[in-house]
Amino acid sequence: MAGDQKAKGKKEQAKGKAKEVVGRAVGNERMEAEGRMEQSKGDARQAKEKAKDTFKH
């Protein structure tokens, strides 16, 4: 289960980064902001899973 969540976090980070880059390239500030938000969401998920791993061992 934790592996699934980590993968989901990585996917969110990558998708967010892509969206941010495309938004910046086309001058769409909203898309750029959504990308940053998605990246942050992925970062938070990754941090949560790492913390869970730390307390497991």
Image: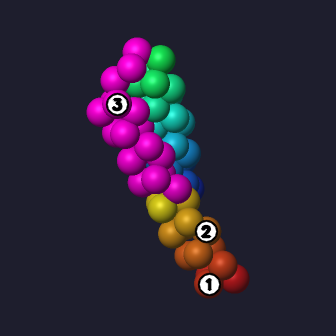
Q: Neighbour class for label 1 at 10 Å: few (<14), some, many (≥20)?
A: few
Of circles 3 and 1, the one toward us is 3
The tag earlier along the polypeptide, 3 or 1, is 3
Question: Which one is earlier in the sequence, the residue at label 1 or at label 2?
Answer: 2
How far apart in space, not on screen, are marks 1 and 2 (Cα)? 9 Å
Q: Give the farthest residue toward the top.
A: 26
Tell me which residue sits at (34%, 30%) in the image.
29
What x and y, as percent, mark residue 36? 44, 43
The residue at the point 61 percent across, 68 percent down is: 50
Q: Which residue is mark 2?
A: 50
Q: Return the mark for residue 55.
A: 1
Q: Disc 2 marks which amino acid? A: Lys
Identify the mark at residue 23; answer none if there is no mark: none
Which residue corresponds to the image point at 40% horizontal and 15% vertical from the top-left? 26
Magenta stretch encompasses residue 8 = no
Helix, strand or loop at mark 3: helix
Tell me if residue 15 can be seen.
no
Q: Residues within 10 Å of mark 3 (few under 14, many from 20)?
A: few
Q: Is 14 located above or below residue 50 in the figure?
A: above
